[in-house]
Amino acid sequence: MFLYIDKWLMDRFEKYSQKIQRMFGITCFEIARVCFLLSSMFIFLWAVAAFTMSGTGWLTNSMSKSSLLLNAAIFMMRALVVMMIVAANYRGVSLCKHLMREYNTLNSNAGLMNKRRIIAESDRIMSIKLMVWYLLIFIPAMLLFDKSGFLPLLSIFVRVAAEYLVCCTPLPPQKSKVKKWIESLLTARKLSPAFDSV
């Protein structure tokens, strides 16, 4: 079942990333890099929100030692999750930079399928399973206890999108439609004497 979901998602991400590349000239690797950075930002905001929105506070006089230890343990667990996800996203950004360099230097291979589409299939399926697990287990807990729980959900969604975008095959380098449109406007402006007289 997850293989069919993976293939369907991979086809959709590749189709729409190529449409974006035709329109704006931005490759799937550049979009994936932004997604990795957004994922890190969302998980960092979750940690900050969870720390500042805790109703008990950290250093109040009325806190018992057990609640202080519990708050400290929860904070350490969240800090560990944040560090792990930020480190994984940093690795993803580095991978995107490497793939961009490879894409820019090996234009002779343009049009060939991205090898990560096959190599990273198990990583993508694991990401889907993680997302399903998060949806089934953490959304009810988020609705009951943690109001900032939507931020890790956004982080996971954006990270899964980045995993798929890294595996897409970009189109060969070409001028985007927006760039062609701007150039046509600029040449029309240069050729038209009516604008110069105003």
Image: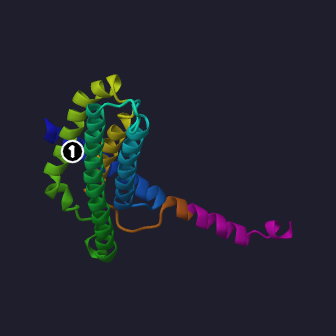
Q: Residue at x 66, y 68 (%)?
A: 186
Q: Main secondary structure of the magenta part?
A: helix
Task: Look at the image and tell me whether residue 118 can be seen.
Answer: yes
Q: Magenta span has 113?
A: no
Task: For mark 1, give the secondary structure.
Answer: helix
Q: Residue at x 53, y 59 (%)?
A: 178
Q: Relative to 146, is 44 above or below?
A: below
Is 161 displayed left or right of 125 in the figure? right
Q: Residue at x 47, y 56 (%)?
A: 23
Mark 1 = which residue? 127
Residue 32, x across and y down, in percent: 34, 56
Question: In front: 32, or 149?
Answer: 149
Other residues around mark 1 within 10 Å, as few (<14) / some (14–19) / many (≥20)? many
Task: Look at the image and tell me whether residue 168 can be seen.
Answer: no
Write down the quadrant of residue 114 in the picture.
bottom left
Amino acid identity at mark 1: Ser
Residue 156, x across and y down, in percent: 30, 43
Residue 77, x across and y down, in percent: 25, 43
Q: Residue at x 33, y 22 (%)?
A: 144
Question: In front: 81, or 191?
Answer: 81
Magenta stretch bounds: 181-198
